[in-house]
Amino acid sequence: MKKILIIDRDRLFLSCLSDFLGFEFTIRTADDELQGIKITQDFEPDLIICDLKLPHLEGYQVLKTLRENRSTAKIPFVFLSCCSEWEERDRALKLGANAYLSKPVRLRKLLAAIEEQLATKELVCI
């Protein structure tokens, strides 16, 4: 079963999304960026979903930190954020995010993005 890490400051959102995705994936959650980075190294997720606005750092810093680490650099990274401005989306993609979705998101759209990133990861690994 594929593993997904979700990093978001909203614990209710984490719980709901974890419950929904938990039927198809092994899920771990973190409600702050430092915990998320630590869990990434221990859990070795196949994909990370991260909010842009976190308690201490922006999600951009999480992405930058993970991209700089050889063991986590290739993990597909999807931003899921309330920020819907094009500038935010462009910045995220330029920094190496694989996808950027705006909240609220339709669950079908989120699943499609997850499946697309996991399929792309599989093609790269072959």
Image: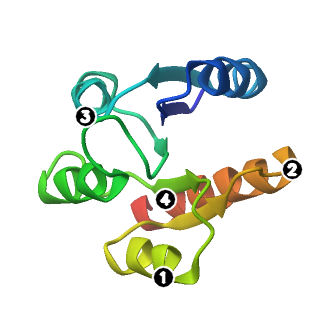
SS at mark 3 in the image? helix
Instruction: Choose the circle earlier in sequence order: 4 or 1.
Output: 1
Locate the N terminus and report the quarter of the image it occupies: top right
Callout 3 amino acid: Ile
53 vs 102: above or below: above
Q: Distance between the residues labelled 4 and 1?
A: 26 Å
Q: Can residue 73 be seen in this view?
A: no
Q: Using residue 113 as the reference point, say whether residue 3 is left or right of it.
A: left
Q: Are marks 2 and 3 in contact (CB under 8 Å)?
A: no
Instruction: Say which mark, if any, is on residue 87.
Output: 1
Q: Do the residues labelled 3 and 1 touch (CB within 8 Å)?
A: no
Residue holding disc 2: 108
Q: Distance between the residues labelled 2 and 4?
A: 20 Å
| Image coordinates for residue 109, horizontal then vertical, percent | 81, 56
Location of residue 44 by image quarter? top left
SS at mark 2 in the image? helix
Instruction: Choose the circle earlier in sequence order: 1 or 2.
Output: 1
Callout 1 amino acid: Glu
Instruction: Say which mark, if any, is on residue 121.
Output: 4
Callout 2 amino acid: Arg
* Residue at the image position 52 percent from the left and 55 percent from the top: 78
Residue holding disc 3: 37
Callout 4 amino acid: Lys
For mark 4, does the 10 Å Cα neighbourhood hold few (<14), some (14 to 19), or many (20 or more) residues? some
Residue found at the very far left of the displayed protein? 69
The one nearer the camera, 52 or 100, is 52
Q: Is residue 62 visible?
A: yes
Q: Distance between the residues labelled 3 and 1?
A: 25 Å
For mark 1, does the 10 Å Cα neighbourhood hold few (<14), some (14 to 19), or many (20 or more) residues? few
